[in-house]
Amino acid sequence: MELPPGIKFIVANIPRMILPPVLTFCGIRIWSLVFNSSPHNWSQISLYLLSFPLALVSSVLYADLRDKRQASLNGAVLAPQVASSWPGGLDLLISNIRNFRGGYMGEVLAQQCKDHGNTINVKLFFDNRIFTTEPEYIKAILATQFASFEKGPVFWDQANSLLGTGVFNSDGDIWKFHRSMTRPFFSRDRIRDFDIFEKHAEDAIGQMKARLREGYPVDFQDMVSRFTLDSATEFLFGKDVSSLSAGLVYPPNSPLAENVTFQNHPANVFAHAFLEAQLATSYRGRFGRLWRLVEFWRDRAKKHTDVCFKFIDPILKEALAKKKAMKEAGLIPDQKQNDKEVSEEHTLLDHLVNYTEDPIVIRDEILNIMIAGRDTVRVHFLGK
């Protein structure tokens, strides 16, 4: 049985939690030996209780001094820190959470960058969170100095429920392995891919015209989301989730908005779970390494990723079984050469099966590419 997230966090941090009282105990013992007397019981209790906040303050001050010294040695300037009224930046955290739930994504950060500059330090729970909108810095992070900006263990822990060990949640050699698997598939345009986009675009436009003829407005973001989901899943698996076949959403004030058949359509169930898994994973970023305490008893992303896995796993098993049957029949050519070749009729899943038969590795990679591909296409079409 897997331990709840909060219990895992406590177990992993037991050494750090017991260190302050242990050092306090040692200090009291040394005091007793040197001065031949022990502090009063109430004094000892106070020292033990104060050991935790004193250790935290000492750690924060040391980290700040270390950062300033490193910046000075490298001739750098630290990013301006966004002012906070509450300890640990709790007021900034609350503002961020409110914006996440009911505002526009990034609205708070945009205002903070406007006030302090393109690169800022939003300190939450005494941890530095560096944000930048500086084009040259973004270019360095994503391209020219990519190897110097690893995602790190905190991000990996937050995103593992959804991304696993996929290309967007790995560093170093593992990242290189995942990149080598997918890169050949995206190295050239294929006519078949354009046919996929055209088919689903015509479907989406046709449904939009029909809805407008009914006299209802169209939620354009929802429509584009369905178009990209169907296009991405057919591109990846060779079969789509048919979210457009469920129909477009009606306005909230319409009596047709609460259609149970529409809500329970398998494609809508998958699309909802896919979105909620991403939101739950993104929400963890507000709490840094402490996210497990917020989700103490259960992983909030897992129930949604399980729904996604129920759709992906049967398709994956079918692809692996097909490869096994072809291998037993001697129909698979030289493996090394086969890995490099991407034929017109191949899906990304077919291509990945040529590299590995590990279903978890393939599933992680598929989900990573699905998230990236779907959102990239959606932003492109929303921005046109």
Image (cartoon, grey):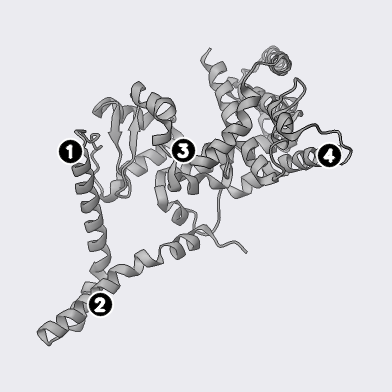
- Looking at the picture, how far across and down is residue 139, in whole percent? 39, 24
Q: Is residue 244 above or below residue 156?
A: above
Looking at the rendered structure, the kind of residue marked 3 is Arg
Q: SS for tag 3?
A: helix
Q: SS for tag 2?
A: helix
What whole-number distance in Å separates the C-alpha atoms at marks 4 and 3? 50 Å
Q: SS for tag 4?
A: helix
Q: Earlier in the sequence, mark 4 or mark 3?
A: 3
- Looking at the picture, how far across and down is residue 229, in whole percent? 66, 28
Q: Earlier in the sequence, mark 1 or mark 4?
A: 1
Side of 92 relative to 150 (left or right)? left
Q: Earlier in the sequence, mark 2 or mark 1?
A: 2
Nearest to the eye among marks 1 and 4: give it. 4
Nearest to the eye among marks 3 and 1: give it. 1
Badge 4 crowding class, 10 Å Cα cut-off, few under 14, some 14 to 19, many 20 or more, is few
What whole-number distance in Å separates the C-alpha atoms at marks 2 and 3? 45 Å
Looking at the rendered structure, the kind of residue marked 4 is Lys
- Looking at the picture, how far across and down is residue 307, in whole percent? 68, 44
Q: Identify the residue at horizontal 16%, vertical 84% (top origin).
A: 32
* Residue occupied by mark 3: 101
Q: Which mark is residue 25?
A: 2
* Residue occupied by mark 4: 327
Q: Earlier in the sequence, mark 3 or mark 1?
A: 1
What whole-number distance in Å separates the C-alpha atoms at marks 1 and 4? 61 Å
Q: Identify the residue at horizontal 58%, vertical 21% (top origin).
A: 377
* Residue occupied by mark 1: 72
Nearest to the eye among marks 2 and 1: give it. 1
